[in-house]
Image: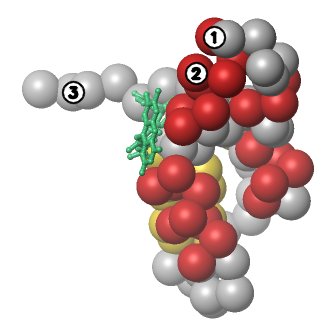
Amino acid sequence: MSAPTSRPRVLIIGSGFGGLFAAKKLKKADVDITLIAKTSHHLFQPLLYQVATGILSPGEVAPATREILQARQRRGRIRRCD
Ligand SMILES: Cc1cc2nc3c(=O)[nH]c(=O)nc-3n(C[C@H](O)[C@H](O)[C@H](O)COP(=O)(O)OP(=O)(O)OC[C@H]3O[C@@H](n4cnc5c(N)ncnc54)[C@H](O)[C@@H]3O)c2cc1C
């Protein structure tokens, strides 16, 4: 667990395009970012059909989130609380 800080904290849920772009945009901002995602990889959906047709391997369309962001990521699933 990280030490308490007075910097604003940002929680990003999911490592899809939305989550990755949010994390990249905020990288130089004076905030602490935590990204929580169900998987440790980003699934590049536009190239899924190339996997289905055998042109690419699954690994080629699902790079590790850690490598894309060069940062630590927490695995987890956000549950809805009604
Ligand atoms: C086959 C296919 C081809 C496509 N081709 C194109 C294209 O050519 N051009 C284009 O512009 N768009 C294309 N799209 C659409 C595009 O991929 C989506 O619009 C885009 O991925 C949406 O990004 P997102 O970050 O909003 O959501 P997602 O990519 O769905 O990411 C959501 C993330 O949140 C995580 N998540 C969900 N629920 C939870 C939870 N409860 N707790 C923790 N994490 C959670 C998921 O694991 C995932 O990492 C395509 C989609 C598909 C399926």
Dot 1: within a 10 Å radius of its alpha carbon, few (fewer than 14), some, or many (20 or more) residues? Answer: few
Residue 19 image label: none
User: What's the residue type where badge 3 is placed?
Assistant: Cys
Determine contact: label 2, label 1, CB under 8 Å: yes
Label 2 residue SS: helix
The answer to whether one can see residue 37 in this image is no
Is label 3 or label 2 in front? 2
Q: Earlier in the sequence, mark 1 or mark 3?
A: 1
Spatial separation of the CA atoms under disc 1 and disc 3: 36 Å
Q: Which residue is mark 2?
A: 49
Residue 52 image label: 1
Q: Quadrant of the C terminus?
A: top left
Label 3 residue SS: loop
Task: Judge: label 2 CB < 8 Å from ligand 1.
Answer: yes
User: What's the residue type where badge 1 is placed?
Assistant: Ala
Residue for point 76% across, 11% down: 54
Asked which quadrant contains residue 80, the reply is top left
The answer to whether one can see residue 33 in this image is yes
On screen, residue 31 versus residue 59, left or right, reads left
